[in-house]
Image (cartoon, rainbow, N blue to C red):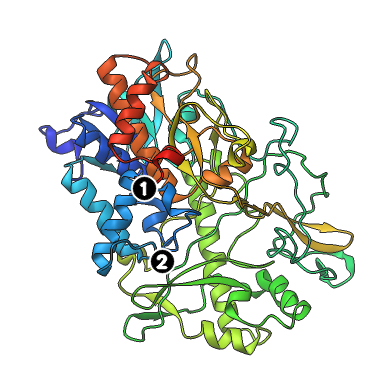
C-alpha cells in the first residue's frame, strides 16, 4: 500500500499533510520491513518510510549468499524469512536465493500486515521536546517538488544503514574506526595484513608498483590509490570500509543481457588489476578475483575477493554523512566502476584466458531489477554512522570475554572489515583495513546497543546503525541479524507504548519474555528454539 498524502485532500493539497501513528519506521531495509510487520501484528498503528523506494535493502538487492556464521543463532521472523524463501524453492529453508524472490517475501510481509508505506521521501527535519521526538518532516528524496509531509509517532525506529534519522535527532554517533585504545581492542583502527596470510587474501603481493610508469614516483599514482601515509597498527581514523554491489548475473542465454561497454568506460581504472594478474600468474580462475556464488535458476551473487575486485576502495568516505544528492553521485560512481570492471574482465587482452572465458558467459538477468535497468539499486553500505548509545558492543562481546545482561538477539559472524584504503608502502601498492577473525561461538547483543543515551532521546530505537565499535559492528552487521534486531526493536517499542515509558525504562524481564514468545534466540539455553 503506497501512501499518497494528496489523495486525502481536495485540490489544491496543502503543503503539509500531518499523520499520526504509534510507531514510525524509517528505512526500507530488511530490518525496517520486519519491524513494521511486527509492530502491525502487535496491534500498533505503524508507517514505513522508504527514502530510496527500495524494499528489503541488501537482502533483496543481490545478497543471496546469506552470511550467517551459525544458523542456530537465527530465530524469530528472521528465521521465518528464510523459511518463506524455502517455500518458493520447495525446501524447508533457503539461504541462497534470487533478489526477486526476496522482494516478494518482503512485499508479502507488508501486504499481510496492511502496512502503509511512504516511498521516495526522506527525513529532512526532526522536532524534539524534552528529549522526545514529536514529529519528523519528510521531503521528496529527489527534490523534484516541495511537497512536504509531517509524521508524528509515539516511538521512532531508525532502520537505515546510514543512521540518518538518528543523526537528525541529535543522538551521538561515530563514523570510521576507533583507535584500539578507546575500548581496549586489538582489531580496530589501521590494519595492514600480509599477502595470503591472516586477513591477507585481499592483499597485493609484494612488488606491484603503484605508479603510472612502474617504478617512477614522478609519474603519479594509478587510479584508486591514495597518497595517504601508512599509519600505525590500531590507529583510529574516520575512513570507512569499502562498499560494492552484490552482483546478480545469469548464464541463461534466454534471460541474459550482455555486458557491454559503459558510456564512460576508462580502462586505466583497472590498470592495477592488470598488474595483479602479472604478479600472481598462478591465479587465473574466477574465484581468484571474485566470490562467484551460484544462486537458484542459473544466477549469481558476485562479491569481492582479492587485491582488486568489486570493492571500490576509498570512494565511499563521505557516504555516511553525505546529502542525498552527494550519495547519488557516489552511487553512480560505483555503478560505473562495477560495470566497467565486468567489461574490462570480459574484453581486455591482459585478462587470463580462463577468467575471461568464464566471465564472458554471464550477463545481467532480464527478470531482475526490471525497473532499475536490470542492475541492483542497492549499494552495499557495509558501515555508515554508528550510534554511541547506552551500551557499546565491542570486540570483547564478540569473543565472549564480556557478556550482556539484556540480550535481544544473537550475532555469530566473524569480526570482519573489508579494506579501507589503498596506499603506497615502501614503494609498493598495498590494501589496508581488511580484518577476518572468527572461531568464536554466537554471542548476545544488548538492548542498550539499540538504545540512545536517555538524556539524548527517549523514544527512538536504532537496530541497524546500532551502538558498536567498528570491528564489533563488522561481526554484527549481517542481514539475518538486522532482521532479528528489527523485530526485537518493534517489540520493545510496543512495550514502551503500553507502559508509557521511555525506551530506556521498560521492564527488561517482560521484554525478554515477549522475545522468547516470538522465538527469538537469546543465548545458549534458547539456541534450539
Q: Is residue 62 above or below residue 498?
A: below
Q: Is residue 151 left or right of residue 29?
A: left
Residue 41 % position (x, y): 20, 36
Instruction: Tell me the distance, in whole angstroms, between the alpha carbons under discs 1 and 2.
Output: 19 Å
Of the two numbered discs 1 and 2 in the rendering, the one whose residue sits closer to the viewer:
1
Q: Is residue 463 visible?
A: no
In the picture shown, does residue 438 fall above or below 386?
Answer: below
Residue 196 spot, x, y in % from top left: 74, 66
The residue shown at (76%, 57%) is 193
**Residue at screen point 79% across, 49% down:** 228
Rendered image: mark on residue 30: 1
Quadrant position of the C terminus in the picture: top left
Label whose residue precedes the other's in the sequence (1 or 2): 1
171 left or right of 176 in image? left
Residue 1 figure quarter = top left
Task: Between residue 436 and residue 55, name the one nearer to us.
Answer: 436
Q: Position of residue 245 (x, y in %)?
A: 50, 61
Residue 228 in view (yes/no): yes
Q: Is disc 1 surrounded by few (<14), some (14 to 19) or many (20+) residues within 10 Å?
A: many
Residue on which the image places disc 2 = 375
Residue occupying the far left of the picture:
10
**In the figure, 166 relative to 306: above or below?**
above
Which quadrant of the view contains residue 65? bottom left
Give neighbour class at mark 2: few <14, some 14-19, many 20+ (Cα, 10 Å). Answer: many
The front one of 53 and 113 is 113
Looking at the picture, how far across and down is residue 250, in whole percent? 40, 78
Q: Residue at x 42, y 69 (%)?
A: 248
Q: Which mark is residue 434?
A: none
Amino acid at each position: 500500500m503506497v501512501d499518497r498524502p494528496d489523495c486525502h485532500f481536495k485540490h489544491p493539497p496543502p503543503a503539509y499533510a500531518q499523520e499520526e501513528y504509534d510507531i514510525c519506521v524509517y528505512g526500507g531495509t530488511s530490518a525496517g520491513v520486519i519491524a513494521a510487520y511486527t509492530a502491525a501484528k502487535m496491534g500498533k498503528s505503524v508507517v514505513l518510510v522508504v527514502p530510496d523506494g527500495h524494499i528489503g535493502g541488501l537482502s533483496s538487492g543481490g545478497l543471496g549468499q546469506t552470511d550467517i556464521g551459525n544458523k542456530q543463532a537465527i530465530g524469530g521472523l528472521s528465521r521465518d524469512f528464510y523459511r518463506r524463501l524455502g517455500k518458493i524453492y520447495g525446501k524447508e529453508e533457503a539461504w541462497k536465493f534470487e533478489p526477486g524472490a526476496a522482494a516478494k517475501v518482503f512485499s508479502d510481509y507488508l501486504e499481510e500486515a496492511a502496512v502503509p508505506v511512504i516511498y521516495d521521501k526522506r527525513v529532512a527535519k526532526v522536532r524534539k521536546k524534552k528529549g522526545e521526538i514529536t514529529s519528523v518532516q519528510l521531503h521528496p528524496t529527489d527534490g523534484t517538488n516541495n511537497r512536504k509531509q509531517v509524521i508524528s509517532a509515539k516511538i521512532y525506529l531508525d532502520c537505515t544503514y546510514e543512521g540518518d534519522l538518528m543523526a537528525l535527532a541529535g543522538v551521538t554517533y561515530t563514523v570510521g574506526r576507533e583507535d584500539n585504545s578507546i575500548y581496549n581492542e586489538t582489531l580496530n583502527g589501521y590494519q595492514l595484513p600480509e599477502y595470503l596470510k591472516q586477513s591477507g587474501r585481499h592483499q597485493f603481493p609484494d612488488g606491484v608498483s603503484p605508479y603510472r610508469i612502474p617504478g617512477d614516483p614522478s609519474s603519479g599514482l594509478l587510479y584508486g590509490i591514495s597518497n595517504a601515509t601508512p599509519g600505525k597498527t590500531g590507529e583510529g581514523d574516520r575512513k570507512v570500509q569499502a562498499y560494492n554491489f552484490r552482483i546478480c548475473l545469469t548464464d541463461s542465454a534466454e534471460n541474459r543481457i550482455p555486458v557491454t561497454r559503459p558510456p564512460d568506460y576508462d580502462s586505466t581504472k583497472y590498470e592495477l588489476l592488470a598488474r595483479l594478474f602479472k604478479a600472481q600468474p598462478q591465479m587465473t580462475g574466477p574465484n581468484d578475483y571474485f566470490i562467484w556464488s551460484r544462486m537458484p535458476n542459473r544466477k549469481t551473487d558476485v562479491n569481492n575477493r582479492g587485491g582488486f575486485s568489486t570493492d571500490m576502495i576509498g570512494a565511499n568516505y563521505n557516504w555516511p554523512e553525505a546529502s542525498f544528492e552527494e550519495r547519488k553521485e557516489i552511487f553512480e560512481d560505483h555503478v560505473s566502476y562495477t560495470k566497467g570492471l565486468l567489461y574490462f574482465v570480459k574484453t581486455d587482452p591482459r585478462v587470463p584466458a580462463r577468467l575471461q572465458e568464464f566471465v564472458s558467459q554471464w550477463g545481467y538477468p532480464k527478470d531482475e531489477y526490471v525497473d532499475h535497468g536490470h542492475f541492483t539499486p542497492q549499494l552495499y553500505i557495509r558501515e555508515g554512522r554508528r550510534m554511541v548509545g547506552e551500551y557499546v558492543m565491542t570486540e570483547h562481546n564478540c569473543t565472549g570475554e564480556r557478556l550482556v545482561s539484556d540480550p535481544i538477539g544473537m550475532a555469530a559472524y566473524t569480526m570482519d572489515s573489508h579494506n579501507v584504503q589503498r596506499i603506497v608502502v615502501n614503494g609498493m601498492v598495498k590494501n589496508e583495513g581488511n580484518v577476518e577473525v572468527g572461531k568464536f561461538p554466537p554471542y548476545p547483543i544488548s538492548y542498550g546497543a539499540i538504545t540512545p543515551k536517555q538524556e539524548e532521546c527517549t523514544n527512538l530505537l536504532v537496530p541497524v546503525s546500532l551502538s558498536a565499535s567498528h570491528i564489533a559492528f563488522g561481526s554484527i552487521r549481517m542481514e539475518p541479524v538486522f532482521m532479528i534486531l528489527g523485530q526485537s526493536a518493534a517489540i520493545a517499542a510496543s512495550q514502551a507504548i503500553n507502559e508509557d515509558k521511555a525506551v530506556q525504562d521498560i521492564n527488561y524481564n517482560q521484554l525478554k519474555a515477549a522475545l522468547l514468545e516470538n522465538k527469538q534466540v537469546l543465548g545458549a539455553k534458547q539456541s534450539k528454539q
